[in-house]
Image (cartoon, rainbow, N blue to C red):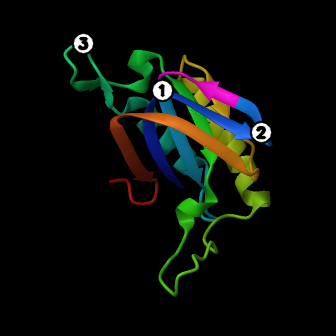
Amino acid sequence: MRVTLQRVTEASVVINDILYADIQQGLVVFLGITNKDSTEDIEWLCRKICALRIFNDASGKMNNSLLDVKGEVLVISQFTLYASTKNGNRPSYIKAAKPDIAIPLYNLFIASIGALVSGAVKTGEFGADMKISLINDGPVTIHLDSKVKE
């Protein structure tokens, strides 16, 4: 499982020209799921995301976590995180999980992170054509992979 996190002051997702969800201070979590992912990947990622000290304290240093700032979370399914560009110029997404595997894991990820945070957890719509707007604060953008754990 892969995520790209962006620390934001605000973010929103629009589907079919209608505002679907929005958050204030917190994280946008772009979530990619592969066929080899399991509940262990979800548990590790959710704990790591909540504990990362990437929010500023009163001194302006990144010492606070999502939990410390009571930040909100916007989870967006993002199969393109598993794009392979090894051959040619058209990315292959063969490593991304098909919906029958990905949707239950996506829903479990949302529930799992929701159980850990005090701020709101909002989502896009799995498989939808979404327009994401965000103000990246910092900018802070972090990539995590549950198989690599760096």
Boundaries of the magenta span? 21-25
Amino acid type, callout 1: Gly
Q: Residue 58, labelled with which disc?
A: 3
- Quadrant in the picture for residue 37: bottom right
- Quadrant in the picture for residue 90: bottom right
- Are the residues at dot 2 and dot 3 in contact (C-beta closer than 8 Å)? no
Secondary structure, magenta segment, majority class? strand
Instruction: Identify which residue, 64 or 108, lies in the foreground.
Output: 64
Image side of residue 101 versus residue 64, left or right: right
Viewport quadrant of the N terminus = bottom right
- Residue found farthest to the bottom: 87
Q: Position of residue 125 (x, y in %)?
A: 75, 43
- Residue found farthest to the top: 58
Q: Position of residue 95 (x, y in %)?
A: 60, 71
Q: Residue at x 59, y 62 (%)?
A: 80
Q: Which residue is mark 2?
A: 17
SS state under label 2 = loop
Q: Residue at x 53, y 50 (%)?
A: 41
Instruction: Identify which residue, 125 or 130, lies in the foreground.
Output: 130
C-alpha span from label 1 to label 2: 24 Å
Q: Residue at x 63, y 59 (%)?
A: 79
Amino acid type, callout 3: Ala
Q: Position of residue 32 (x, y in %)?
A: 58, 55
Q: Residue 26, labelled with which disc?
A: 1
Q: Residues within 10 Å of mark 2 (few under 14, many from 20)?
A: few
SS state under label 3 = loop
Q: Residue 4, labelled with which disc?
A: none
Going from the N terminus, do you reach mark 1 or mark 2 first?
A: 2
Q: Residues within 10 Å of mark 3 (few under 14, many from 20)?
A: few
Image side of residue 67 versus residue 29, left or right: left
SS state under label 1 = strand
Viewport quadrant of the C terminus = bottom left
